[in-house]
Image: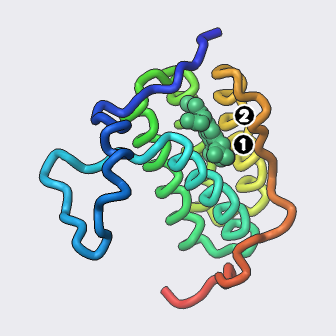
Amino acid sequence: MKMFTLAKPAAGIIGALALVGTISLAGAQQPREGERPQPRLADLMQGAQVGHIKLWYAGKAGNWGLATYETKQLKTRLEDAAQLYQSLPVNDVTTMAKPIQAVSAAIAAKDVREFARAYDELTAGCNSCHQSVKLGFVHLRTPSSNPFSDQNFAPGKK
Ligand code: HEC
């Protein structure tokens, strides 16, 4: 089992935080090329959590366009996490490829039952990485109520 150590972004995050108070947001400059601020891993994960929820309700509603979109978002987020935080266990990153593929295949087949099965596999992948980095207390499951009441999950216009 690999111990997880919180990876620090390469840029001097402490220095950046010290500056926060003095920067006027209105006058904030665009970061220069190659200086894009890194998202925090926990923020990427919270985004993944949102995607995980939305993916479920999209699939359940048979909104396959949205389900495809959310799967891509989730995949990109996990790829970003793996690329930016290389202390993440490689095994647990790569094992996510299979459930993501299974979810995509179920979406392509518009197969609600298979979607639900693949979604369980996906969730198990989230939890298995959390366990291997000693964050087993971050335990995901299939959502039972939809917090995004401002979004209509029914299949809409293209
Ligand atoms: C390869 C490992 C890995 C995978 C896969 C993974 N996570 Fe995480 N997750 C982490 C780590 C590491 C943290 C702790 C981040 C931190 O605190 O800096 C975390 C934290 C979280 C948190 C807590 C964030 C918070 O601030 O509340 C949530 C929620 C979360 N992950 C959701 C997910 C979901 C949903 C999936 C699957 C779609 C997933 N994770 C897949 C490694 C992973």
Most extreme residue toward the right is: 144
Spot occupied by residue 158 in the image (x, y as percentages of width and height): 48, 86
Residue 123: give its label.
1
Q: Name the residue under label 2.
A: 127
Pointer 1 with pointer 2, Cβ within 8 A: yes
Q: Is residue 145 left or right of residue 97?
A: right
Q: Can residue 92 be seen in this view?
A: yes
Q: Quadrant of ligand 1?
A: top right
Q: Measure how far apart labels 1 and 2 are at the Cα level.
A: 6 Å
**Quick check: 65 left or right of 129?**
left
- Element type at marker 2? helix
Few, some or many residues within 10 Å of mark 2 (<14, 14–19, 20+):
many
Q: Which is nearer the eye, 65 or 77?
A: 77
Tell me which residue sits at (56%, 71%) in the image.
66
Beta carbon of the mark 2 residue lies under 8 A of ligand 1: yes
Count neighbours of disc 1 (C-alpha within 10 A) and say few if under 14, some if 14 to 19, many if 20 or more: some
> Which quarter of the image is occupied by the N terminus?
top right
Residue type, mark 2 in image? Asn
Which secondary structure lies at badge 1?
helix
